[in-house]
Image (spheres, coloured by chain):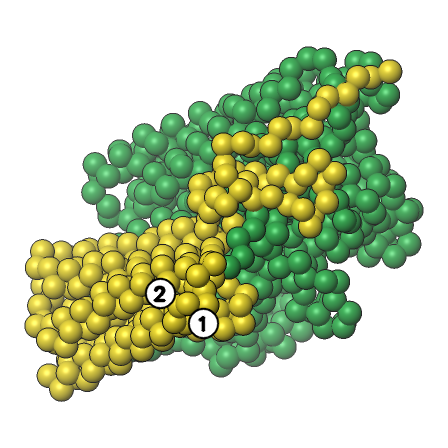
Amino acid sequence: MHDMSAHAQVAHHVPPASFIRKHIFSLDHKVIGKQYYGLALVAVVVGMVLSWLMRIHLGWTNYAIPGLHLLSANGAPGNVMTPEYYLQLMTMHATIMVFFVLTTAPFAAFGNYFLPIQAGAEDMPFPHFNMMSFWVTFVAFLFLVSSFFVSDGPTLGGWTQYAPLNAVGPVGGPGEGTGVVLWAISIGLFCVGQLLGSLNFITTTLDMRTRGMSLWRLPLSAWSWFITSCMGLTAFAVLMPACILLILDHVAGTSFFVPSNLVINDQLQPHSGGSTLLWQHLFWFFGHPEVYIAIVPGMGIVSHVLITNMRKPMLSHRVLIYSMGALAVLSYLVYGHHMFVSGMNPVSSLAFSFPTLVITIPSSIVVLIWLGSLYGAKLRINTASLFALGFISMFISGGVSGFFLAQPSVDIMLHATYFVVGHFHMVMGVAAMFGIFAGTYFWFPKMYGRMMNETLGKAHFWLSFVGTYAIFMPFHYLGLAGNVRRYQAFVDDYMKPFIPVHQFITIAALFTGAVQLIFLYNLIYSRFWGEPATDNPWEATSLEWSTPTTPPPHNNFGDKLPVVYHDPYQYGVEGSAGDYVMQTSPEKVNGPDEA
Amino acid sequence: MATTIQPPKLDERRPATSGNGGGGRSTPPADGRLPAVKDFAPPPASTGIWVLLFSITMTFLAFTSALIVRQGSAVDWQHLTLPPVLYLNTLVLIVSSVTLELARREVGAFMGPMAKSMVHPGRWLYATLALGLLFVGGQYVAWLQLRSQGLYLATNPNSSFFYLLTAVHAIHVLGGLGGLVRVIFKLNHSALKKSTLVATSRYWHFMGVLWIYLLLVLSAKI
């Protein structure tokens, strides 16, 4: 019976020869990472176009958007969006962005590509599961998008799919029949994909590290992927059963979420005894950790990028890791703050309010470590570091409004307004997107062997930075003024003065969306015609910059695994040939080696 | 010129045959060449199986919490008498764990120096496989018995949870049977790793424990 080491037990798959094995059903974690990135790129384009359509409708409600009827003849007769179709687009925008962009790109894409390399491994330990993880996620995306093409279109219940309307079938409105079922199948499959991914991420981190790579010597990005995979393992394992229960309520006539004596559109529903709050508990037990699943990888990526460009480590490597870990644990204790207005027992609201305020402590510590580390640093200004700074800016701006929403008495007033929309878009959406951009500009040279254009990159950053503030800051003012969210038009007298603000936001959204074409052009142009990159263009220290070739070879390190001598961030080292010492360098350094 | 430091020391606390423990690091030799790798880190399957079992536990805890909320918040809950065949199925699953444990011990000896004097240990693995299939078949019989009483998936919330939990558990058992088939295949081709067998047996035993838990949950009157 064979009994070998962690490394030796991994399937040493030889470089594939066929196109299908190399580019489609690949077992290579790097190819799978790129596939996830490609999926996120397609998803973000779809999600952004949907947001454009919604914004145009909100600014100019009766405006006929040319060609919209081609997307849905029923949803946009005469190219003007119906109220129901607005909600359907809103649901799809949110679902696509949260699941297929903010989860897949920073976690699954970058994590797949770089976690094994940063740990010093040849590959993930279960490459077949890894391949399945991507393809199950891809099929999940197809299920979701296919709901555009069923008779009454996609579901209109929002990304939270609240009961009971999500469980009663077509009587609940357009998209509440087949659309909900497709949504639930899609999200259920997505959960399976992410569970398979988390299994690989955790095992890679614990068992696949190379010699000398203690846990503390892992870069902060690797730590963030590890912490996120632990969160995902718990959160997605709970959302998946919730989706199964939802599907059964739809197709099998069970009553998990639909209460007795429910009358919708003058029809008594053939269900009894279900609990509407049950869905909310199951959903938000996943839903709030999902916020951190989206943002914690960004924290790790941004820290990694900033340190490289500051040429000095963070104030404390370990405290930053502890804080990310604390965010992960606390994220499960705070989920009820999404349910302050759900009819939950007020005592429960208080119980959830306290940890919600407590979770601001590790968040603040992370921010203070970033700011304290930046103080006095001679930061190298490049596109990656600019987007990292932008991430911090968005995280602070969006996070501050979280203090208000953590208190039930304030949240009751603000919960259904645009204040919440502004809050979560900045702290979770745009911040995470900036983390993705920082990672892209930073790691692109290693992934493709070519540099991205810095001039275009900086233009992309500044225009995106100004544009996103122009979109999302006014949401806060609108919310404070009482502008209700989820409305497709503002016809009440008190809301009419808000319309010019919405028109301004729409113009800002169209502008900022168009700016992303600069990024897309830069990405495609640089992929094929960019300036060739050296093995270590940023003079960085972690293992991904120690690969024998750029991009890395099939087994990452050739015929020799690296040996690690230092913590990941030895910058500003006196007496060294450069101002840094690679993790693989046996050179002795003076000063602390925190790891 | 900068001075250099020695490579990190090998972790002497773990013997070369260690198959357990977490958080270990793999330790390639000083020249980093893969073929000479020693075992100082647990095989990924050892850690991976615990990760998988944790995930399955969370899934069934979610179902259980739904059952408790549903049972406590509505008046339409009707306790059902569990089909008697379930107790026989439970016994079958427990015996299958025993046969798998016998197989695990025999496989270890079979792959050692006494191999030629031993009977091929596959018999216990086949016995486990047969008992596993018998269990799944028995669960189907339980569903038929429930149907004969007029209790279907949507009849009442208790029957809903009964069909749901037994079906999801049976799917997981089928996954375990797939793992057993893989173990038998690898054993017959002399390519079985100890960690694969250990991970499969842990999964199988967990299925037994999980079933007993579900049986208690389904029969409990809160």
Of all chains, the one bearing label 1 is B
- The three-letter amino acid code for the residue at tag 2 is Ala
Residue at position x 69%, y 28% from top? B7
Q: Residue B83: x and y, percent? A: 12, 76
**In the drawing, does residue A379 fall left or right of residue A88?**
right
- The three-letter amino acid code for the residue at tag 1 is Ile
What color is chain B drawn in? yellow
Residue at position x 62%, y 59% from top? A11
Residue at label 2? B103
Instruction: State whether residue B151 is above or below residue A219.
Output: below
Instruction: State whether residue B98 is above or below residue B167.
Output: above
Q: Is residue A402 visible?
A: no
Label for residue B184?
Answer: 1
Q: Residue A421: x and y, percent? A: 49, 45
In the image shown, does B103 or A332 lie closer to the viewer?
Answer: B103
Q: Secondary structure at mark 1?
A: helix
Contact, mark 2 vs mark 1 (Cβ under 8 Å): no
* Chain appearing in green on the rendered image: A
Residue A25: quadrant of the picture: bottom right
Q: Is residue A338 visible?
A: yes
Q: Quadrant of the C terminus of chain B?
A: bottom left
